[in-house]
Image (cartoon, rainbow, N blue to C red):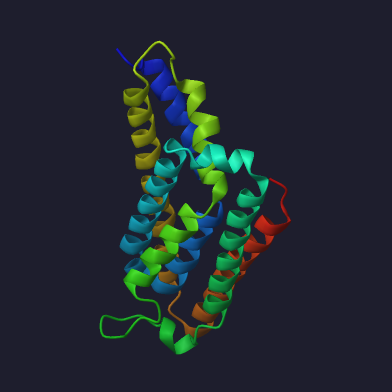
């Protein structure tokens, strides 16, 4: 057996604990779900899945190692991702109140494709996600077994858990959004979500990596 059950379940539990901690991606999911309701769930979860897959591909093709060695490149990724979050936070903060009272015939200020793209880029541009796979996965790799199969199984496990985690956060936030239809509440949710995004970007800028 390439990966024994005990190693796999330990990896899954450790991954879930890490995923439950809200980071920039989860804050993005919560912010958009609060302001757009259940309409945002599918594009956001899809974007997170694509972003995590992109980060894994980058890691396994050597970009993670490059980021570890080249501090300037790591800093560049970090700044681009942080500034992008701040930009999205400002956009969400400024969203008109009348655009947040969603119905089937109301045009969205953020289309599903734009939300998917934002979630994809936010997840993929986080250099910590890329380095994470290189720092975390090797602890569960058996050098005497097939490396590619082990990486595939563990990577897929993490990816599935990440998608489920994003889906859970999106569902909870959208449920809250549906209960607060009042425009005043909706404006407050927009500003809370915008503040979360901008705050995550700002925190990323001042946190030493």
Query: Farthest residue toward the left?
Result: 105
Task: Name the one closer to the observer, 104 or 8.
Answer: 8
Residue drawn 51% across and 33% down?
134
Whether residue 192 is situated above or below residue 27 in the rendered picture? below
Apparent side of residue 83 relative to residue 180 in the rendered image (left or right):
right
Q: Quadrant of the C terminus?
A: top right
Q: Quadrant of the N terminus?
A: top left
Residue 113 at x, y = what percent? 33, 70
> How many marks on residues?
0
Instruction: State the image coordinates of residue 20 (x, y, percent, origin top left).
Output: 51, 44
Pick the residue in front: 128 or 63.
Answer: 63
Residue at (34% x, 66% y) in the render: 38
In this view of the protein, can residue 21 be seen by the observer?
A: no
Residue pictured at 60% horizontal, 65% vertical? 196
Corner quadrant of residue 33: bottom left
- Please state the horizontal and vertical placement of residue 130, each as a whole percent of the image: 51, 43
Residue 99 to residue 200: above or below: below
The image shows residue 28, relative to residue 14, as above or below, that is: below
Q: Is residue 50 visible?
A: yes
Q: What residue is drawn where x is 37% and y is 64%?
A: 116
Q: Position of residue 155 (x, y in %)?
A: 38, 34
């Amino acid at each position: 057996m390439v990966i024994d059950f005990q190693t796999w379940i330990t990896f899954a539990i450790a991954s879930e604990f890490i995923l439950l901690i809200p980071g920039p991606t989860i804050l993005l999911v919560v912010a958009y779900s609060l302001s757009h309701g259940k309409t945002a769930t599918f594009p956001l979860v899809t974007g997170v899945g694509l972003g995590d897959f992109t980060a894994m591909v980058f890691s396994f093709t050597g970009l993670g190692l490059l980021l570890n060695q080249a501090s300037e490149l790591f800093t560049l990724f970090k700044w681009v991702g942080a500034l992008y979050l701040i930009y999205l936070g400002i956009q969400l903060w400024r969203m008109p109140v009348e655009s947040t009272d969603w119905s089937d015939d109301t045009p969205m200020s953020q289309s599903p494709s734009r939300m998917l793209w934002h979630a994809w880029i936010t997840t993929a541009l986080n250099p910590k996600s890329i380095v994470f796979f290189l720092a975390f996965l090797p602890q569960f790799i058996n050098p005497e077994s097939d490396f590619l199969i082990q990486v595939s199984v563990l990577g897929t496990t993490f990816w599935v858990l990440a998608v489920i985690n994003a889906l859970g956060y999106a569902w909870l936030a959208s449920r809250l959004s549906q209960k607060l239809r009042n425009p005043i509440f909706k404006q407050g949710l927009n500003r809370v979500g915008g503040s979360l995004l901008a705050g995550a970007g700002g925190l990323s800028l001042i946190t030493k990596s």
